Amino acid sequence: MIEIIYADNAATTKLSKTALDAMLPYFREQYGNPSSLYSFGQKAKEALEESREKTAHILSCEPREITFTSGGSEADNQAIVTAARLGEKKGKKHIVSTAFEHHAVLHTLKNLEKQGFEITLVDVHKNGIVRPGEIAAAIREDTCLVTVMYANNEIGTIQPIAEIGKICRDKGVLFHTDAVQAAGHLRINVKEQNIDMLSLSAHKFHGPKGIGLLYARRGIIPEVLIHGGAQERGRRAGTENIPAIVGMAAALEEAVSQIDKVTPELIRRRDRLIEGLNKIPYSELNGDCNHRLPGNVNFCFEGIEGESLLLLLDDKGVCASSGSACTSGSLDPSHVLLAIGRPHEVAHGSLRLSIDTETTDEDVEYIIKAVAEVVDYLRNMSPFWHDLVSGKRPHIFSE
Ligand SMILES: *Cc1c(COP(=O)(O)O)cnc(C)c1O
């Protein structure tokens, strides 16, 4: 059996040993219900509140400003619906966002559109970065929310959220950021960055799946999406998933404590990967080469079909992705690549590699070689590619 090189950390990550160890006692020893009055249940309650304090400290907010959710999708939904309901009361039914948000944001906005909200999706530039001035220009008298992601999940580009937050604060409009890809990799300080609401998901930073959180600034009371008991101060019903919450806090604490130490190495490997893949003719990096997540590499290859590329890489033991995991299975090209202006033909031939600290220099070299071989093989078989080579069709990228 060949060894697997896991280069899809933007889709999900391996649970860290630290997070696992922190979680284990809460399955079989401290399994009480935090809502119970006896002291056994109160132990679980303590773990819950300690986790809230830990995560709040990392985000530079108050523990009471944190609501635990089932993940990033739920937090995004809750943040957006909260702003929409607050806006509605004041007759403000306009929301500003961008065309390359995660579907948890875009589909929530689509649903609000059906309820009479008007959505403006600001353009993303070719480099995968949103310009704050264009967000400012899109804000109107009746705007109730601006939602822009911190880092994009496909192309890894980092957005100027502090600047966008400042614009929103000055104009009195709520600002939400989906920080799911940023958490554990980039600094987050909700105060300094003028963030009113923020979403996180543990499984993107080596925590467990099915747990996330919503930060909502004091004074913004999250709209209830899950009705039932009074857990999370009445904002999210359901018995708290204590092992997962404890695991998320431990994973976030660990990831944040290692940012300074691991980032330079990760960037060095990422840049080597970019350098190696750039040598493949008619290929281009998607998104800015500097303002991107330390582990993200995303390329388009002309004359290639992303799905075939992934299957052949899988045969070589490389786990990668094309577009986002949520849309794979559909044959539509990535909405993110279309948003940065890639034509359909090349948007289909994309590859996302998201490495982490376990990816070695040897892995990087292996990936470069594997991708080059697979691209070459697929192009040789492709009638479309032969049309490009023979000049029947014009190339989009240069050699
Ligand atoms: C993964 C992801 C989500 C969804 O998080 P889940 O916890 O899987 O629901 C939302 N936004 C971004 C940017 C993501 O990468």
Image (tube, rainbow, N blue to C red):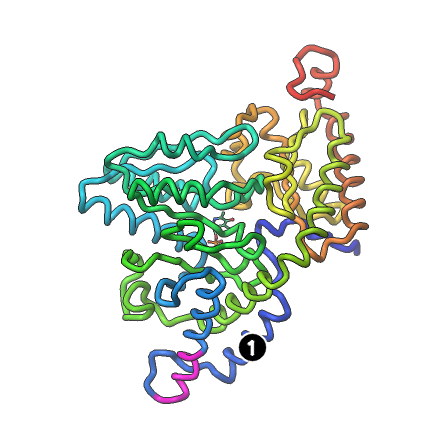
Judge from the rendering whether residue 94 lies leftward or rightward of residue 353; answer left or right. left
Residue 274 seen anywhere in this rendered image of the structure: yes
Judge from the rendering whether residue 86 lies leftward or rightward of residue 334; answer left or right. left
Q: Mark 1: few, some, or many residues within 10 Å (few <14, many ≥20)?
A: some
Give how far across and how far down residue 346 sits, in percent. 61, 26
The residue under the point 41% across, 87% down is: 40
Q: How many marks?
A: 1
Q: Is residue 322 above or below residue 263?
A: above
Give how far across and how far down residue 242 sits, in percent. 45, 73
Give how far across and how far down residue 303 sits, in percent. 68, 25
Q: Is residue 67 above or below residue 297?
A: below
Report the span colored magenta: 38-46
Quadrant of the image occupied by residue 370: top right
Secondary structure of the residue carrying tag 1 is: loop
The question of residue 41 being in magenta is answered with yes
Observer-nearest residue: 58 or 343?
A: 58
Observer-nearest residue: 242 or 273?
A: 273
Q: Main secondary structure of the magenta part?
A: helix
Query: Where does the N terminus fall, quadrant-wise?
Result: bottom right
The residue under the point 36% across, 52% down is: 196
The residue under the point 66% across, 13% down is: 393
Badge 1 is on which residue? 24
Give how far across and how far down residue 309 sits, in percent. 68, 37
Query: Where does the C terminus fall, quadrant-wise?
Result: top right
The question of residue 198 being in magenta is answered with no
Residue 224 seen anywhere in this rendered image of the structure: no
The residue under the point 54% across, 54% down is: 187
Judge from the rendering whether residue 240 lies leftward or rightward of residue 278; answer left or right. left
Amino acid type at circle 1 is Leu
Quadrant of the image occupied by residue 134: top left
As drawn, the residue found furthest toward the bottom would be 39
